[in-house]
Amino acid sequence: MADGFGFRTPTGNIYCNGSLEGGAELSCTIVNRESGSSPAAIGGCPAGHEVSVDLGERGPARATCGGPAGRLSVYSDVASYGATGTFGRIVCLSEQTGFSCRNADGRGFFLSRRSQQVF
């Protein structure tokens, strides 16, 4: 059985990859964002670029600015709106307003077309 997994939100604009080997780790990317939507916590990522956030079971979320926005995800596993997923000690929620995850320390992130936040 493989320890890696991947899924997307219904629009395909947010997709995640993760692993449960040696403790859960999750990396989520938002492809298309509105201009000026990225706060300093995301590193001032310019409009038209993807933002990725990595989160482990403990500790802070780490955001990075990616390359120019690419194609939407076509993963067959979809986190439907209203769905909650638990990956080790990381809990995620998919909503029409955005996608959020928190770890055991209460640290995490929120991603939507309008706003990207790490906390």
Image (tube, rainbow, N blue to C red):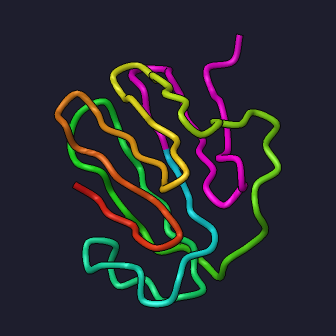
Asked where in the image residue 7 lies, by quadrant, the reply is: top right
Q: Quadrant of the N terminus?
A: top right
Indicate whether residue 13 is drawn in magenta.
Answer: yes
Query: Could you tell whether 77 is left or right of 9 in the image?
Result: right
Q: Which range of residues does the magenta coloring cover?
A: 1-26
Residue, x 61% and y 55% (percent of image)? 14
Q: Is residue 13 above or below residue 101?
A: below
Residue, x 61% and y 20% (percent of image)? 3
Residue, x 33% and y 22% (percent of image)? 89
Query: Of residues 47 and 11, which is closer to you in this image?
Result: 11
Q: Which percent across, then down, holds residue 31?
A: 63, 68
Asked where in the image residue 102 lies, by quadrant, the reply is: top left
Indicate whether residue 44 is drawn in magenta.
Answer: no
Q: Which percent across, then down, holds residue 52?
A: 49, 61
Query: Could you tell whether 18 is left or right of 36 in the image?
Result: right
Query: Could you tell whether 93 is left or right of 83 in the image?
Result: left
Q: Which percent across, then down, holds residue 81?
A: 59, 40
Q: Which percent across, then down, holds residue 116?
A: 39, 67
Query: Could you tell whether 19 is left or right of 86 in the image?
Result: right
